Image (cartoon, grey):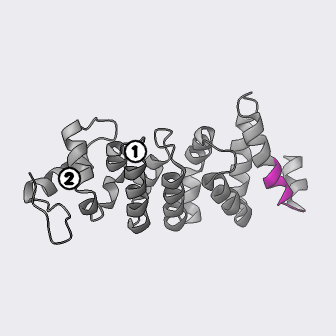
Amino acid sequence: DSQKDGRNTPVATREDLALLKDIKLRDPLSEISEQEKELMWRLRHECLQIPDILPRLLDAVKWHTREEVSQLYLLLSDWKAVSTQTSLELLDCKYADLTVRTRAVEWLDRSLSDEELGQYLLQLVQTLKYEPYLDNPLSRMLMRRALLNRKIGHFFFWHLKSEISSPNLVVRFGLLLEAYCRGQGAYLKHLNRQ
């Protein structure tokens, strides 16, 4: 069995750390074995030093166990910012947990300039389709950034408008369009003309 340090935390061997780094580098669609999941969970505090391993660690959490979910939330409060790609991965429908999604949006909001947000805007609007709640951190962030930057707002408006004909999105995207339009003031006349 593994050794423990003075705080009763498992000590990672050099091989364990190498395996964690290998897991982080794998394709997001590749499966990780049960043994690897157990190792990751046992060494979850070591994972703090490899921020972009977070999606793999989330795959190792037993979500039906309140104790593990509580432990994860404590870890998330200390987790360093992940890359833009990892943040986007955390917004996949596979990760429905609101706390995880909130952290991913916080990291994206901090790391993306308006220009970079413009590059990911279509993908993020598409991601809104899979948000578990109508009022969610992603839609709030996109709304705020769209209202603060007219260029982002313009594309945000048209991305929403192009999807609104879909019956399962009419409420979600309709609410966002209405909220956006209410925040436009005089610019709304310009959008109407378009």
Q: What residue would you read off at disc 2?
A: 20
Viewer-proximal residue, 158 or 107? 107
Q: Residues within 10 Å of mark 2 (few under 14, many from 20)?
A: many
Q: Which residues are magenta?
A: 178-185
Viewer-proximal residue, 24 or 36? 36
Residue at the spot 27% in from the left edge and 59% down from the top edge: 47
Magenta-highlighted stretch: main secondary structure?
A: helix
The image shows residue 65 at horizontal and vertical percentages of: 40, 44
Please, what is the three-letter code of the amino acid marked with disc 1? Thr
Viewer-proximal residue, 16 or 21? 16
Mark with earlier residue (2, 1): 2
Query: What is the secondary structure assignment of the residue under circle 2?
Result: helix
Specify the quadrant of the image occupied by residue 172: top right
The image shows residue 21 at horizontal and vertical percentages of: 20, 54
Q: What residue would you read off at disc 1?
A: 65
Looking at the image, residue 127 sits to the left or right of residue 179; the answer is left
